[in-house]
Image: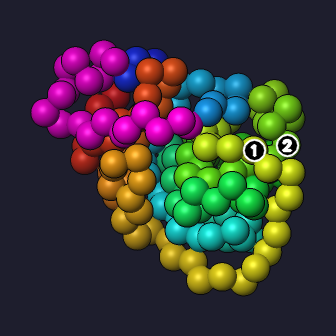
Amino acid sequence: MKDFKVADLCDDNLDKVTIADAIGFNSYGSKKRFGGKIHTLKCFEDHSYVTKIASTDGTGKVLVVDGGASPRCAIVGDKISSLAIKNNWEGIIVYGSIRDAATIATLNLGVLALHVYPISKTTSTDWETQVEVTFAGTVFKPGHFVYVDEDGIITSENRLV
């Protein structure tokens, strides 16, 4: 993806972007600036569905996972992150927890999450993919675009870079 700065994209497109609330996301992957077409997943305390989506072609896409902000279960770890890299995902935004933070920090993938937690599990919960998910005061819509860097997260209906 072409180099960009979220602040500059906001300056140039303020009427075309939605700015996510600063709710405390932390950057864990080595790629601090990433963006692409939004692919959503809604699941709660179950990493198996993230694995399924990360196993698909992610070229030009960012996986946005609504994990219900759970601090009790990591739904992304080093294996899922490595799988996402193998399948060309630009990054993963997790509204919830990850684990293996030290390893993820060495991977060329954008990874944002609220927290770290050492345990992951499979609970066979309901899940949905390619549905609108809402967190950080923002509706993440499949097929729209998301851009992330050290200044924040923005979404847009159209590609900006």
**Picture coordinates of residue 135 (x, y %)?**
42, 53
Q: Residue furthest left?
A: 15
Whether residue 107 is visible: yes
Q: Which residue lies under the disc numbered 2? A: 100
Q: Which mark is residue 158?
A: none
Q: Earlier in the sequence, mark 2 or mark 1?
A: 2
Three-letter amino acid code of the residue under disc 2: Asp
Q: State the CA–CA distance, disc 2 to disc 1.
A: 8 Å
Q: Is residue 150 above or below residue 91?
A: above
Residue found 70% across the figure and 32% down from its top: 29
Q: Are marks 2 and 1 in contact (CB under 8 Å)?
A: no
Which quarter shows the C terminus? top left
Q: Is residue 54 visible?
A: no
State which mark lies toward you, 2 or 1: 1
62 or 139: nearer the viewer? 139
Magenta residues, as a range? Answer: 7-25
Q: Amino acid at mark 1?
A: Val
How was this image coloured? rainbow
Q: Horizontally, is 32 left or right of 131 in the view?
A: right
Secondary structure state at the residue bearing disc 1:
strand
Give the vertical position of 50 relative to 149 (above or below): below
What x and y, as percent, mark residue 34?
52, 31
Quarter holding residue 20: top left
Magenta stretch: includes residue 151: no
Determine which residue is flagged by label 1: 116
Specify the quadrant of the image occupied by residue 43: bottom right
User: Whole-percent x and y of residue 58?
Assistant: 58, 52
Query: In the image, what residue occupies the spot 43% across and 28% down?
Result: 152
Label 1 neighbourhood size at 10 Å, few (<14), some (14-19), many (20+)? many
- Secondary structure state at the residue bearing disc 2: loop
Q: Residues within 10 Å of mark 2 (few under 14, many from 20)?
A: some
Give the vertical position of 146 relative to 117 (above or below): above
